[in-house]
Image (cartoon, grey):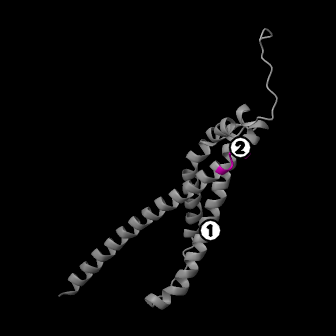
Amino acid sequence: MTIGQVVATQVSTNQLMGKLTWVFLAIIVVVGGAGIANAMYANVAERRREIATLMALGASRSQVSGIFLLKALVLGLAGGAGGYLLGTVAAVAIGPQVASITVLPIAWLAPAAVLGTAAIALLAAGPDASCVWSAAASFRTSGRPTPKSRPWAPARPSPDPSV
């Protein structure tokens, strides 16, 4: 085996590892986005009453949707910052022990992580923020008691005086 063959093997191994890294990153982004979308959907579903109250007070659809998108943005920013900090601390602490190499933080990854997770959070929450209106409408139809469920309420007079 020559040095050229060893180098060629190492180069192909590095290329394979680079491709696998992108595959794992894609899987992490999809799973993370699905988790955020699920959390935002549950949040909208649980807050139907508050959404209906905001609508009754005169909030527009864009204002109510903006509240949920702002929450997603804050969660994305916090998740990106926390993930970068935890990942960097873990790499700096574990890297020398596991791989016998010194790991240095990469400064440009901090804004990339924070902005990337914020963008993913907004993309994942977008459909749920747009269904805010239908959630409030379903509360209007299902959240109020019907006359049959209020036997104590007096019967409404008929609009026709001959009846």
Residue 146 in the image: state x and y as whole percent.
Answer: 71, 34
Please, which residue is most extreme toward the left here? 1
Between label 1 and label 2, give the one nearer the viewer. Answer: 2
Q: Are marks 1 and 2 in contact (CB under 8 Å)?
A: no
Identify the magenta region.
Answer: 46-51
Residue at x-position 35% and y-position 67%: 19
58 in magenta: no
Amino acid beneath label 1: Ala
Quarter of image, res 79? bottom right
Q: How many marks?
A: 2
Using the image, determine if residue 118 lies above or below residue 126: below
Quarter of image, res 90? bottom right
Instruction: Decide which of 17, 3 is in the foreground and name it.
Output: 17
Circle 2 sits on which residue? 51
Quadrant that contains the C terminus:
top right
47 in magenta: yes
Q: Is residue 1 left or right of residue 49?
A: left
Compare marks 1 and 2 and give the one earlier in the sequence. Answer: 2
Circle 1 sits on which residue? 81
Amino acid beneath label 2: Ile
Q: CA distance from mark 1 to mark 2?
A: 30 Å
Q: Secondary structure at mark 1?
A: helix
Q: Is residue 69 visible?
A: no
Residue at x-position 26% and y-position 81%: 7
Mark 1 residue crowding within 10 angstroms, few (<14) / some (14–19) / many (20+): many
